[in-house]
Image: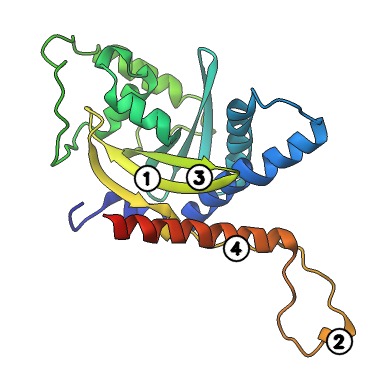
Amino acid sequence: MGQQNDLDRISEQVIQKIYQSLFQAVGEDYQEAESHLELETHISRPFMIWDFINRNLIKSFFQTNVLYSTKKRGMWEVLLLYDKESKMILSFMKDTRFKDVRKAKRGRQPQYVKALLLLNKSLQAKVKQQKLFYITEPECDNDQLNALLDSLCANFMEPVISEIKHHALIVFSSNYDQLTSLNAYMLDSDLDIVSEKDMLNVAKPIMSNEVDKVSKGDVKHKQPKLTEKANRRLKQKELVALKSMQNDKQE
């Protein structure tokens, strides 16, 4: 939206690690857990996947320029990443939850989200949502939100609050063990979109490190064969790309 997109400050390497972490969490990680635990029902699946996502993100960015912080909020735990290069705080949300939060009255929007959006107080979307609740709903206590923001950022390995420029929300969707969308949004205080970026257009397909053993008859082929796992990953990437093309045509 506009010529300059602040989300372009997030490097391709960071986007790739995010993609890989979510890709594996919604697919192979849950499948392996389901097989190992011999689950007959899947009631806990949405919550278990979040544990996989958070674990994968923490491991992927270990000893990099991206720090992490976790904070318990009621029954939920929030994971934040701080990217030193882009100077952005990154948080994560499912697309269905994102839609619900944007539609909700101000009093029912998550406090931690409003606290993070204090980082974007200098930003305003060009296109605003039409909301009927602004006049009757009281404004949030900024002192309280600032205290919450400090609390959310307190568990990083080093102080970051004075370095942060903006907050970006990473929103994803999945279906049938596949990652079907991955978008980054910068929002203003009303949760209107200032800028956005389709991360699937940047991320590369994931290749398995494992390869099938090449038989003597295959020596003439320069490229090793991909495992079944790697082929599944490539097929998923192709399906996502095809879906994106179909959506573009419909628009």
- Point out which mark residue 217 bears: 2
Q: Which secondary structure, mark 1?
A: strand
At label 3, the amino acid type is Val
**On the picture, is 117 further left or further right than 207?**
left
* Of the image marks 2 and 4, the number of the one nearer the N terminus: 2
Alpha-carbon span between mark 2 and mark 4: 25 Å
Alpha-carbon span between mark 3 and mark 4: 27 Å
| Residue 134 image point, x, y percent | 14, 17
Q: Residue at x 21, y 51 (%)?
A: 1
Characterize the local packing of mark 4: few (<14), some (14-19) or many (20 or more) Cα atoms within 10 angstroms: some
What colour scheme governs how the chains and residues are painted in the rendered image of this protein?
rainbow
* Of the image marks 1 and 4, the number of the one nearer the N terminus: 1
At label 2, the amino acid type is Gly
Characterize the local packing of mark 2: few (<14), some (14-19) or many (20 or more) Cα atoms within 10 angstroms: few
Q: Which secondary structure, mark 4?
A: helix
Q: Is residue 61 visible?
A: no
Q: Which residue is mark 3?
A: 66
Q: Residue at x 40, y 57 (%)?
A: 244
Q: Is residue 136 visible?
A: yes
* Of the image marks 3 and 4, the number of the one nearer the N terminus: 3
Up-down: is 180 above or below 37? below
Q: Which residue is mark 4?
A: 234
Up-down: is 19 above or below 42? below
Number of callouts: 4
At label 1, the amino acid type is Ala
Q: Which residue is mark 1?
A: 184
